[in-house]
Amino acid sequence: MNIVSFSGGKDSTAMLLMMLEKGIPVDRVICVDTTKEFPQMYEHIEKVQAMIEPLKIEIVKIDFDYWFGEHIKTRGKRKGEKGYGFPDFRNRWCTALKQESYGRIAASMQYNPRKRGGVNSIPNDIVEFHGIAFDEKERTSNNKGRNIKYPLVEWQITENQALDYCYSRGLDWGRLYEKFHRVSCWCCPLSRIGELRVLHNDFPELWKELEEMDKKTFRKFKSNYSVAELSEKFANENL
């Protein structure tokens, strides 16, 4: 069984459409929705869905708000406290949650009573396809031991080539890639300052939501800035 891991970004989109063009069998397409994607991303996924009918994009949602601010920790230094707050380089809980959600669905495709889910319990006869571009091929070393293929690496398709291909198919994400290097979760504190400035200036409704999130967490948004401090910084720049 061939499963495509589909984030909706330029690389996974190009990979999926190219695979279908080349006649490579695709049995299932799994997309994990953090519920913190740009509105334009949800529109993009609908467009791709229309292009690949009757194949279905299976959406798996995670409850980001619950884990961010409501989950009660049962162990560790912060036992009893609520929420994991904003992720950082040492605690990328949102990435781990996406991987666990994807792995649980993939593992359930062929039930193994000895394994309970997650990426390490995916049956060996399932082949995963991940959209990693040729110029980021070093990332493929992170998944050793799993039955994963990287078509864009095999075809030597770079990130820019993947984006150009998507544009040629009429997909433009509402011009998000003209504003951001990556178009994953809009609330990510690992985003560059320049991209956060764009979020503040061009997406005020999302920035307002980010300010509300900032009030609910113990963890500072970035090591050198809170969201409130960034709001002040960007507002002063616009005077």
Image (cartoon, rainbow, N blue to C red):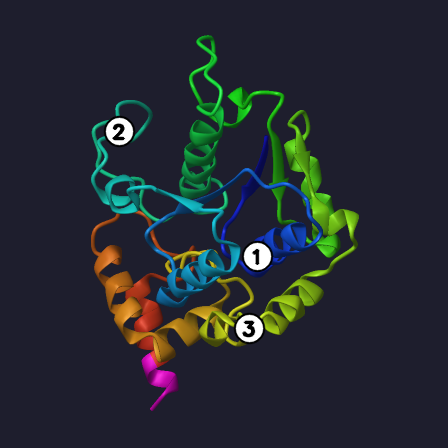
For this rendering, which residue is in front, 142 or 190?
Answer: 142
Res 13 label: 1
Res 170 label: 3
Residue extending furthest front?
54
Residue depicted at x 66% and y 71%: 164
Q: CA distance from mark 1 to mark 2?
A: 36 Å
For this rendering, which residue is in front, 141 or 109?
Answer: 109
- Check disc 2: other Cα within 10 Å, few if <14, some if 14-19, many if 20+: some
**Residue 68, image x, y percentages:** 28, 44
For this rendering, which residue is in front, 76 or 190?
Answer: 190
Which of the 4 quarters of the picture holds residue 230? bottom left
Q: Amino acid at mark 1?
A: Thr
| Secondary structure of residue under mark 2 | loop
Residue depicted at x 51% and y 60%: 51
Magenta segment: does it hold 238?
A: yes
Q: Amino acid at mark 3?
A: Gly
Region of the chain picked out in magenta, as a range = 235-239
Q: Name the N-terminal-most of marks 3 and 2.
A: 2
Res 73 label: 2
Locate the N terminus and report the quarter of the image it occupies. Answer: top right
Residue extending furthest bottom?
239
